[in-house]
Image (cartoon, helix red, strand yellow):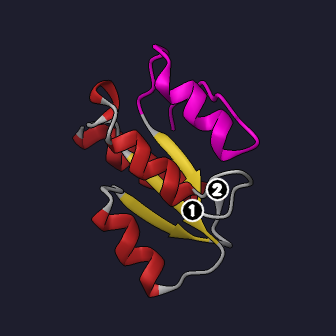
């Protein structure tokens, strides 16, 4: 699997700050349960940003509730991964998404 450069942030508002900037991102991983703004709120704002509309987004959640899954896809998520998951499985999903974008 390819090596990735990761830009970790601790909360929703910081994620938005980074995404509203000019940094290049090939893919965004968002946890639904983030302090300050949920992953779904960040996804919704991200899809409204002209320069981020087509960036693939993977949503992570410990809840695995169908309502969250539906909302994530309605907001434009490319994939939805329920915790616990193996890092290997997540990397395989990310590779798949990056190959098709």
Of residue 21 and residue 56, the one placed in the foreground of this image is 21
Q: Residue at x 65, y 39 (%)?
A: 13
Residue 22 numbered tag: none
- Give the answer, above or below, for where 69 lies relative to 98: below
Q: Residue at x 36, y 57 (%)?
A: 77
- Give the answer, above or below, for where 97 lies relative to 66: above
Frontmost of labels 1 and 2 is 1
Q: Residue at x 41, y 29 (%)?
A: 26
Q: Which residues are magenta?
A: 1-26
Q: Residue at x 28, y 37 (%)?
A: 53
Q: Earlier in the sequence, mark 1 or mark 2?
A: 1
Magenta span main SS = loop
Q: Position of residue 45 (x, y in %)?
A: 42, 44
Q: Quadrant of the C terminus?
A: top left
Q: Residue furthest bottom?
A: 66
The kind of secondary structure element at disc 1 is: strand
Badge count: 2
Using the rendered image of the protein, determine whether residue 68 is visible from the camera's viewpoint.
Answer: yes
Q: Which residue is mark 1?
A: 60
Q: Which residue is mark 2?
A: 87
Q: Is residue 89 left or right of residue 76?
A: right
Of residue 32 and residue 48, the one placed in the foreground of this image is 48
For the residues labelled 1 and 2, the Cα–Cα distance comes to 12 Å
Q: Position of residue 11 (x, y in %)?
A: 72, 45
Q: Is residue 9 magenta?
A: yes
* Other residues around mark 1 within 10 Å, as few (<14) / some (14–19) / many (≥20): many
Of residue 27 and residue 53, the one placed in the foreground of this image is 53
Q: Is residue 75 left or right of residue 38?
A: left
Q: Position of residue 19 (x, y in %)?
A: 50, 29
The kind of secondary structure element at disc 2 is: helix
* Other residues around mark 2 within 10 Å, as few (<14) / some (14–19) / many (≥20): few
């Amino acid at each position: 699997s390819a090596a990735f450069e990761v830009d970790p942030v601790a909360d929703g508002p910081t994620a938005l700050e980074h995404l509203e900037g000019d940094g290049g991102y090939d893919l965004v991983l968002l946890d639904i349960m983030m302090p300050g703004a949920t992953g779904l709120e960040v996804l919704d704002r991200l899809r409204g940003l002209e320069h981020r509309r087509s960036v693939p987004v993977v949503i992570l959640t410990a809840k695995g509730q169908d309502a969250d899954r539906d909302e994530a896809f309605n907001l434009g998520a490319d994939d939805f991964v329920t915790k616990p998951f193996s890092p290997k499985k997540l990397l395989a999903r990310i590779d798949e998404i990056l190959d098709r974008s």
